[in-house]
Image: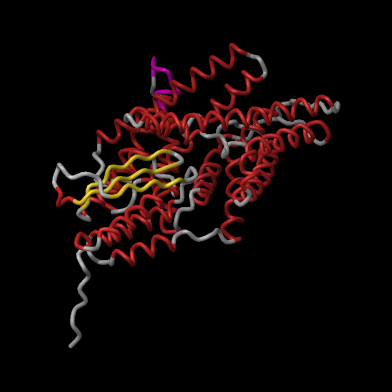
C-alpha cells in the first residue's frame, strides 16, 4: 500500500524560499499587465497565507517589497527588502491565469514552494514564430475592424487600414527584441502609416485619410494605459498613476510627431493626398466586424483557447452596453454615459466571473473595455495641437478627460455592485 504524499505547509518553509516565491510572483503579475492596486493586494494576500507581512510598492517600472515574519507581531521590522527593476508590462491573459493558478496551488498546499517558484520561472519563455505571426495578424484584423465598426469607412479604407496594421504589427515584433528600435517604434509606426496612406490616396485610390491613419494605429494608442492611470490615481496610488499617465502622454506625442512628420515630408515631396470619403460600409457589417475584432483582441491579449468564448462575450457585451447606454442617455451626454454604463457592467461581470470560475477577472475586464477606452480621442487632441488647431485640441482634450473619468467611475461602481473576491 502506497503512503500518501504530504506537501510541506508553505507557511513553515524557509524564509528565503517564501520570499523568493513572492518576488517571482510579483514579477510575473507585473510583466503580464496587472495594475498597481491589484498587484499590491494580490502579493499582500499571498504573503499573509505564507506567514509573512509584505509591504508592497508597485509602479510601471519597478516593484519594492519589504518582508517581515508574522511571528514578530506588529512591532517587527522588515527583515528583507527587495527592489525589482522592470519594463512596463503587457497583458498576457494565458500566463496571468497560469501564475494565478500556481499561487492558488501553493497556498492550498498542493504544490511545494520551490516547485511553484520553478513553474513561475518557466512561464518566461520567448514567443514562438507562430505567436509572433498571430500578433501581427491581430494588429491587421483590429485595424480593419475599427475602420468598419467605429469610423464607418469604405471597403477600400478598411482594407488599407488592415494592411498597414499588419506592417505595424511587424514593426512592433521587431522592436520587442531591439531596445533601440523600441524607443522610437511608436513614432516610426505613425510615420509609416501616414506615408503609406498619403501615397495610396495620391496615386492609387482616394481615402478618408484621418480615418485610415487612426484605424491602423489604434492598437498603439495608449487608451488602456490612460484608463489604468486614472484608476490608479483615483485609488490613491499616485506615483504609479502619474508615472503611467506620463508614459501614455509620451506615446501620444510620439504618434502625433510621426504623423505630422510624415505629412510634412510628403508635402515637401509634392505628394498630396486626395482626401475623399467613399460610400460607407453597410450597417450590417458592424456585426461581423465586432466578432472578428473580439477574436483579434483574444489573440492580442494572448488569451488561452479555453478563454476565447469568455473574451468574445466580454467584447460584445461591452460594445452593446456602451451603444445602448448612449441611446438611452436622454438629456445626459451620450458618450460619457454609455462609457460609464459599459465600464460598470464589465466590472461587475469580471468580479462575478472571478468569484464563480475561480479565474482572474482580467479575462473579462481587460479585453472588454478595449472598445471603451478613449485613446483615439487623445490621439486626435495631440494631433490638433501639433497642427496648431488649439481650440479643437483643447475641446478634444476635455472630451478625453470626461470619458476617462466616466470609464474609471463605471469600473469603480461595478466593484461596489459586485465585490471582488479575488485580487486579479
The color scheme shown is secondary structure
Which residue is rendered at x = 59% and y = 55% of the image? 132
Inspect the magenta stretch and tell me whether residue 331 lies in it. Answer: yes
- Quarter of the rendering containing residue 265: top right
Classify residue 11 as left or right of residue 81: left
Q: Nearer the viewer, residue 64 or 404?
A: 64
In this rendering, does residue 319 appear at all? yes
Q: Nearer the viewer, residue 372 or 379?
A: 379
- Quarter of the rendering containing residue 358: bottom left
The residue most toward the bottom is: 1
Which residue is rendered at x = 32% and y = 54% of the image? 22
For residue 370, above or below residue 336: below
Which residue is rendered at x = 61% and y = 56% of the image? 133
Where in the figure is residue 273, as x and y percent of width and height? 78, 27
For residue 53, above or below residue 412: below
Q: Nearer the viewer, residue 149 or 424?
A: 424
Inspect the magenta stretch and tell me whether residue 120 lies in it. Answer: no
Where in the figure is residue 369, as x and y percent of width and height? 43, 37
Classify residue 20 as left or right of residue 51: right
Q: Which residues are magenta?
A: 330-338
Quadrant housing the N terminus: bottom left
Classify residue 308 as left or right of residue 10: right
Amino acid at each position: 500500500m502506497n503512503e500518501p504524499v504530504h506537501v510541506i505547509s508553505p507557511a513553515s518553509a524557509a524564509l528565503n524560499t517564501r520570499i523568493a516565491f513572492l518576488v517571482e510572483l510579483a514579477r510575473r503579475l507585473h510583466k503580464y499587465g496587472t495594475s498597481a492596486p491589484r498587484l499590491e493586494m494580490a502579493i499582500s494576500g499571498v504573503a499573509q497565507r505564507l506567514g509573512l507581512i509584505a509591504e508592497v510598492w508597485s509602479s510601471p517600472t519597478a516593484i519594492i517589497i519589504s518582508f517581515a515574519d508574522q511571528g514578530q507581531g506588529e512591532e517587527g521590522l522588515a527583515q528583507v527588502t527587495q527592489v525589482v527593476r522592470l519594463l512596463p508590462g503587457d497583458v498576457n491573459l494565458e500566463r496571468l491565469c497560469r501564475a494565478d493558478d500556481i499561487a492558488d496551488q501553493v497556498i492550498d498546499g498542493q504544490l511545494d514552494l520551490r516547485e511553484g517558484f520553478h513553474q513561475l520561472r518557466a512561464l518566461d519563455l520567448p514567443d514562438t514564430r507562430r505567436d509572433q505571426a498571430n500578433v501581427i495578424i491581430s494588429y491587421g484584423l483590429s485595424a480593419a475592424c475599427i475602420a468598419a465598426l467605429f469610423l464607418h469607412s469604405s471597403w477600400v479604407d478598411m482594407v488599407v487600414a488592415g494592411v498597414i496594421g499588419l506592417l505595424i504589427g511587424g514593426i512592433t515584433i521587431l522592436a520587442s527584441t531591439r531596445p533601440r528600435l523600441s524607443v522610437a517604434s511608436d513614432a516610426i509606426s505613425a510615420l509609416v502609416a501616414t506615408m503609406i496612406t498619403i501615397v495610396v490616396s495620391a496615386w492609387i485610390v482616394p481615402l478618408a485619410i484621418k480615418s485610415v491613419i487612426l484605424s491602423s494605429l489604434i492598437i498603439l494608442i495608449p487608451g488602456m494605459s490612460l484608463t489604468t492611470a486614472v484608476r490608479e490615481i483615483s485609488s490613491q496610488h499616485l506615483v504609479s498613476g502619474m508615472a503611467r499617465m506620463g508614459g501614455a502622454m509620451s506615446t501620444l506625442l510620439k504618434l502625433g510627431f510621426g504623423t505630422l512628420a510624415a505629412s510634412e515630408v510628403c508635402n515637401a515631396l509634392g505628394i498630396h493626398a486626395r482626401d475623399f470619403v467613399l460610400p460607407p460600409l453597410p450597417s450590417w457589417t458592424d456585426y461581423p466586424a465586432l466578432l472578428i475584432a473580439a477574436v483579434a483582441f483574444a489573440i492580442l491579449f494572448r488569451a488561452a483557447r479555453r478563454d476565447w468564448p469568455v473574451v468574445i462575450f466580454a467584447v460584445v457585451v461591452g460594445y452593446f452596453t456602451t451603444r445602448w447606454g448612449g441611446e438611452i442617455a436622454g438629456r445626459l451626454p451620450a458618450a460619457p454615459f454609455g462609457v460609464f454604463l459599459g465600464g460598470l457592467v464589465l466590472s461587475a461581470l469580471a468580479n462575478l466571473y472571478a468569484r464563480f470560475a475561480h479565474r482572474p477577472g482580467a479575462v473579462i475586464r481587460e479585453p472588454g473595455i478595449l472598445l471603451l477606452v478613449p485613446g483615439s480621442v487623445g490621439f486626435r487632441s495631440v494631433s490638433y495641437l501639433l497642427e496648431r488647431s488649439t481650440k479643437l485640441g483643447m475641446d478634444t482634450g476635455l472630451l478625453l478627460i470626461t470619458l476617462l473619468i466616466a470609464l474609471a467611475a463605471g469600473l469603480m461602481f461595478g466593484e461596489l455592485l459586485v465585490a471582488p473576491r479575488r485580487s486579479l
